[in-house]
Image (cartoon, helix red, strand yellow):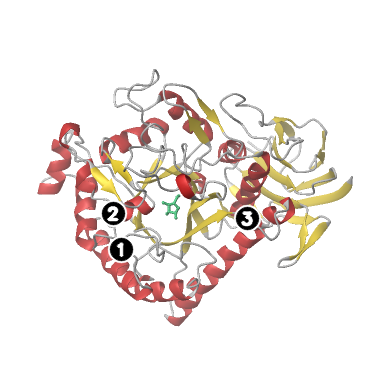
């Protein structure tokens, strides 16, 4: 057993937590939409064909925001195909995923589903095969109250009130060679700027995210951000980051896998440095915020039939990654890191929601279940509310070739002055030893009582949840815990993710 401590003080807040960091992603890809969230023949399906069991799990997951409809799919998508009577909707070839798109789910159906799960939508406009004109037409269709051809068309299609979609992505991964309609940074930056201008003139309430690089290790990373922002800095609110975590073949250890928390922290900090350098060049006081709108573990289902299948199938099984206990630790650690960047990171979307690199899996006509990664996300989305406090961590660690000394303890603390609740998220990434943790919650009020203490730990790091054993990896009570005023002691298992929620009598 080793000793570690975590100190927070009410007088040292970082920033209010934007709960849109608990977003997810629904793309027309594989079985995410069709045979995923939408399966008209399923016993739990509602009148529009959306599965009730998946909606219930999405609410339990606590998704606050849902990005839609892609992804690579977005760059070949004609929004007009997804509105109007279902029987008139065209079947199309989707080049991004070599599939047939039936368009039985489109804007109206997705907005219905969002309302059912209580999540805010984040829509994308296609800047791959289309451009600024399509974007302004789509926005007018969605958000203009009425009295114009496009807004009246929406009303005739069944939505009398405007959808009021606030958050929009200006395209998707426009730097990627795999992207339909890939652009150079200057081409994209100009297009994003003009598209944003028209969208804002049409609806000043929109918030717009420009595409950053599609990964930190893209060869053009940095140059891309700089050039794109040179053109559109003044017109956009967010710059996007995407990251999929792998196990490098050269070092497949769990320790290196979990060090991707630091790699992604640097990705955030480097991207902010570039955005702030553009601001400095422009003598601008504006500070751009970040939208980490695709992130997850994804490396086992990245090849061959996982990616594309012959014959233009409908809803093929693509990217159906099976997650392990080890993956859940990384997801938990990433969430602590996100919270500790709450001053500039305002939006994040776990990619994706259902079946495709997803926390929720389904079988057609059968059950839906929670993958391992579901749990840390659901715990954080439920309990992280209020203000993030700056954590001071003292913990032994391990020397990493790139990042130097990495502490075994990763942690974040979020305090809600309205309820007097403080949520503490803790990852012990030492694989062999228990952590004897002392937690000082200074200035947060006396008479603390325990609301909840849970641990996510599996003796076998490769354990997964499956159709046959859906609850193999799930949170259990954390029992080795004591409270003494503002001081807590807890024993955290090796390789465990933990949540402790306490409450004062401040309210
Ligand atoms: O989430 C799967 C794919 O990953 C998305 O379509 C794309 O944006 C990214 O490359």
Residue 242 picture location, percent across and down: 49, 57
Q: Is residue 205 visible?
A: no
Callout 2 secondary element: helix
Q: Which residue is mark 1?
A: 181
Q: Which residue is mark 2?
A: 76
Label 3 to label 2, Cα distance in Å? Answer: 36 Å
Label 3 to label 1, Cα distance in Å? Answer: 36 Å
Q: Is residue 52 visible?
A: yes
- Closer to the N terminus: mark 2 or mark 1? 2
Using the image as rendered, state which of residue 478 and residue 243 is in the foreground.
Answer: 243
Label 2 to label 1, Cα distance in Å? Answer: 8 Å
Using the image as rendered, state which of residue 69 and residue 250 is in the foreground.
Answer: 250
Callout 1 secondary element: loop
Q: Residue at x 66, y 32 (%)?
A: 473
Q: Is residue 48 above or below residue 492?
A: above
Q: Is residue 234 above or below residue 469?
A: below
Q: Which residue is mark 3?
A: 340
Task: Rate crowding at label 2 as few (under 14), some (14 to 19) or many (20 or more) other CA atoms within 10 Å.
Answer: many
Is residue 392 toward the left or the right of residue 159 in the image?
right
Q: Residue at x 59, y 23 (%)?
A: 468
Residue 320 picture location, percent across and down: 50, 40
Is residue 84 toward the left or the right of residue 353 in the image?
left
Q: Residue at x 69, y 61 (%)?
A: 250
Labels 3, 2: front one: 2
Q: Residue at x 60, y 48 (%)?
A: 335
State which quarter of the image contains the C terminus: top right
């Amino acid at each position: 057993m080793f000793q570690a401590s975590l100190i927070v003080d009410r007088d040292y807040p970082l920033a209010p937590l934007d709960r849109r960091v608990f977003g997810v992603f629904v793309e027309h890809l594989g079985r995410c939409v069709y045979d995923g969230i939408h399966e008209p023949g399923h016993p739990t399906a509602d009148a529009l064909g959306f599965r009730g069991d998946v909606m219930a799990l999405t609410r339990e997951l606590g998704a606050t925001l849902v990005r839609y409809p892609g992804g690579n799919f977005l760059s070949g998508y004609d929004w007009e195909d997804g509105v109007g009577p279902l029987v008139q909707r065209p079947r199309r070839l989707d080049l991004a995923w070599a599939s047939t798109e039936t368009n039985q789910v489109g804007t109206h159906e997705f907005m219905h589903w969002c309302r059912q799960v209580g999540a805010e939508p984040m829509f994308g406009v296609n800047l791959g095969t289309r451009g600024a004109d399509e974007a302004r037409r789509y926005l007018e269709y969605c958000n203009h109250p009425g009295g114009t051809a496009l807004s009246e068309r929406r009303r005739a299609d069944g939505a009398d009130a405007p959808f009021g979609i606030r958050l929009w992505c200006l395209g998707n991964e426009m730097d990627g060679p795999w992207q339909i309609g890939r652009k150079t940074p200057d081409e994209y930056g100009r297009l994003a700027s003009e598209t944003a201008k028209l969208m804002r003139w049409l609806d000043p309430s929109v918030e717009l995210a420009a595409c950053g690089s599609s990964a930190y290790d893209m060869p053009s990373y940095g140059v891309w951000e700089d050039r794109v922002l040179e053109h559109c800095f003044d017109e956009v609110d967010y710059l996007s980051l995407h990251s999929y975590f792998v196990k490098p073949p050269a070092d497949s250890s769990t320790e290196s896998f979990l060090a991707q928390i630091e790699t992604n922290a640097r990705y955030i900090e480097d991207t902010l440095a570039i955005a702030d350098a553009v601001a400095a060049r422009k003598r601008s006081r504006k500070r751009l915020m970040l939208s980490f709108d695709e992130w997850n573990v994804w490396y086992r289902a990245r090849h061959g039939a996982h990616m594309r299948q012959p014959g233009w199938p409908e809803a093929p099984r693509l990217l159906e990654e099976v997650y392990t206990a080890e993956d859940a630790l990384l997801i938990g650690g990433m969430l602590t890191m996100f919270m500790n960047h709450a001053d500039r990171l305002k939006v994040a979307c776990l990619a994706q929601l259902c079946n495709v690199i997803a926390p929720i899996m389904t079988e057609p006509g059968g059950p839906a279940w929670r993958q391992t990664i579901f749990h840390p996300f659901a715990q954080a989305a439920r309990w992280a509310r209020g203000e993030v406090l700056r954590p001071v961590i003292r913990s032994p660690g391990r020397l990493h070739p790139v990042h130097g000394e990495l502490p075994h303890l990763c942690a974040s603390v979020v305090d809600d002055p309205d309820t007097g609740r403080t949520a503490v998220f803790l990852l012990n990434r030492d694989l062999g030893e228990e952590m004897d943790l002392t937690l000082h919650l200074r200035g947060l009020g006396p008479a603390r009582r325990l609301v909840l203490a849970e641990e996510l730990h599996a003796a076998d790091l490769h354990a997964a949840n499956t159709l046959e054993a859906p609850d193999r990896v799930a949170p259990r009570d954390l029992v080795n815990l004591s409270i003494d005023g503002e001081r807590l002691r807890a024993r955290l298992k090796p390789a465990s993710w933990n949540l402790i929620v306490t409450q004062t009598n401040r309210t």
